[in-house]
Amino acid sequence: MKNKKLGRLYNDGEIVIKQGEQGDCLYVIQDGKVEIIDESGEKEIRLAELGETEFFGEMGLFEKDVRSCTVRALGDAKIMTIDKRNFYKTIQKDPTLAYRLLEKMSNRLRDTNKKLRNQ
Amino acid sequence: MVYNNSENLVLEDGSNIAVIGGGPAGSFFSYFALEFSERFGLEINVDIIEAKDFNCIGPSGCNHCGGIVSESLIQALSAEGIVLPSNVIHRGIESYTLHLEQGTTVIETPVHEQRIASMFRGSGPRGSTGDDELSFDNYLLDLCREKGANIISGRVIEAENNNDGVILKTKEGTEKKYDLVVGAVGLNLKALQLFKNLSPSFKPPQTTKTHICEFHLGEKIIDEYFGDSMHVFLLDLPNIKFGALIPKGQYVTMVLLGSDINKQIVSAFLNAKPVRDCFPAHMDIESIMPCQCYPTINVQGAKSAFGDRMILIGDSASSKLFKNGIGAAYITAKAAAKTAIFEGVSENDFRKHYQPACSDLDRDNMVGKFIFTVTTIIQKSPLLKKGLLSMVIKEQTKANHKRLMSSMLWDTFTGSAPYTDILKRTLNPMFSINFFGHTLKRIFNGSNNK
Ligand SMILES: Cc1cc2nc3c(=O)[nH]c(=O)nc-3n(C[C@H](O)[C@H](O)[C@H](O)COP(=O)(O)OP(=O)(O)OC[C@H]3O[C@@H](n4cnc5c(N)ncnc54)[C@H](O)[C@@H]3O)c2cc1C
């Protein structure tokens, strides 16, 4: 059956965002999975795997810095971008739109703390 | 219900909310009221009372609409964590094909990804098999059910103010008292009258007649003739401000918006050459029309759409003129849910915290009316239409060319941007210079051709 999910199709292994590059939009996975990879060392380290409805690239909304990780499609994935300007304009009118973003960022911080504690 | 001062009523644990109408506005309100109350640590009960069964195939299960979910709404829902499932999306739209008597051009999505969905509000037109495809309205109701709302099948026929609540009676014989009643009844006149009885200062929205019909063409023909493009028409025909053919699974939906659309206007549109040319030659398109209707659309927002313990949302209050009514329902429903949970449910709370959302839409619609007046002038002028077409074609074919007209038309057709933003962009001197430059070129070329 034709995949009618919205967004852009990324094939297995295709790079969605590249560590070190500039970027200013948020990505929401509509279908499939992606893996988050740290490429700063000699060997790449897989940091996380994200699935449908989850987002990534949020740092690009708040910081002017380059992308901190690479994100790659894990199998075919459909991904939608939310551009920074639209997002800010909407949040300006409806701050509750940021609840989920804050909740997820807080979850991710908790996970990172846990990992640091276990090292 | 707690009174925190003489005029402020607030919800407390155990408060009961009735949402009359389970269309997009009713579902969005219920979803966000339950979401916010959970974050806030408040336990409320939400009953959604809906008269239709969206599982029914044909008009009885349908909330008559073109079925386009706009780019801005899709993005907002994605940010909320609501991703439309594959069986609700009947096609992802990636371009608009603009048809004029003078020619045709395609306006591609500015971002090269599908951000617009076409769907059915019910379970499809008369005669459809339904298959594994899901109605959009049912999908939203399912989300509310998962959040904890009770979906009640029934029609509310009486609403009566009581000292500390509102009593609702249904045709099915039930009677219950609520702390807050939310009117998400669309443009149903009888249901709107119930709210007028609760709050005499409420003035229902003004409406006009539109037209929708479906053509059963099959997926193969649709792929070949329509593709993933919504076809829009700017033709010199009376009363029609906007005509569109929207591809979906096995069907193409035709939508005509304007003023008081009737049978003669529909027939003139169907027989117009640019419309006929979209279909396979010699096809008797009127014989493949299983469903057609003349629903009304909100063209001027309601006045005083709230009172103590009652509020109207979606089409029953304010919408977006001719576009993105579901997106407007999301805005008003969410504003109402925020007010009810975080502020209170008195007339004053709604005036202070909810009314601004409706006023924003109403103000923007005034600009929208102006834009549609200008569009009507263009629609009637072959020369201006040639200029417009030539400008869009140039923008679409030249890489890195500033897409002034294309982006203006894209946002007008998709309904994603406020009309005020669109107007601001057309005030850019480069826009007028380009447009008149292209139009003058057509005059010059025209006289040369003679
Ligand atoms: C021709 C046309 C084309 C359109 N195309 C689009 C489009 O492509 N995209 C878009 O975004 N918008 C479109 N719209 C606008 C869109 O349909 C509305 O803005 C949207 O449906 C509003 O949602 P709502 O929930 O407020 O009302 P509705 O969708 O009308 O829902 C109201 C619900 O209340 C129920 N109800 C009414 N009275 C009672 C009662 N007494 N008891 C119980 N239940 C009751 C009804 O059964 C119904 O389910 C179009 C409109 C028209 C007329």
Image (cartoon, rainbow, N blue to C red):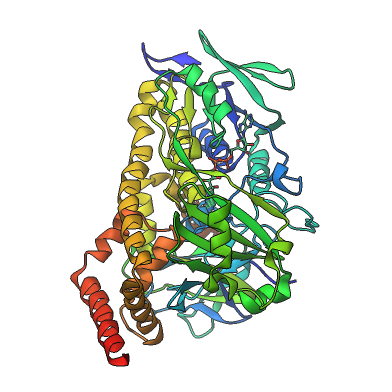
Say if residue B120 shows up in the picture. Answer: yes
Q: How many marks?
A: 0
Q: Considering the image in quadrants, where does the C terminus of chain B appear?
A: bottom left
Ligand 1 quarter of the rendering: top right
Q: Viewer-proximal residue, A59 or A5?
A: A5
Q: Position of residue B340 (x, y in %)?
A: 46, 29
Asked whether, in this view, residue A47 is left or right of residue B301, the answer is right
Q: Residue at x 64, y 24 (%)?
A: B156
Q: Viewer-proximal residue, A62 or B18?
A: B18
Asked whether, in this view, residue B374 is left or right of residue B50, the answer is left
Q: Is residue B24 above or below residue B179?
A: below
Residue lying at the far top in this picture: please name it: B163
Q: Position of residue B124 (x, y in %)?
A: 72, 54
Q: Residue at x 35, y 84 (%)?
A: B394
Q: Is residue A11 above or below residue B237?
A: below
Asked whether, in this view, residue B309 is left or right of residue A74, the answer is left
Asked whether, in this view, residue A65 is left or right of residue B27, the answer is left
Q: Viewer-proximal residue, A61 or B329?
A: B329
Residue lying at the far left in this picture: please name it: B429
Quarter of the view holding residue B147: top right
Q: Position of residue A57 (x, y in %)?
A: 45, 67
Residue lying at the far front in this picture: please name it: B450
Q: Position of residue A94 (x, y in %)?
A: 39, 46
Say if residue B42 shows up in the picture. Answer: no
Q: Residue at x 30, y 86 (%)?
A: B446
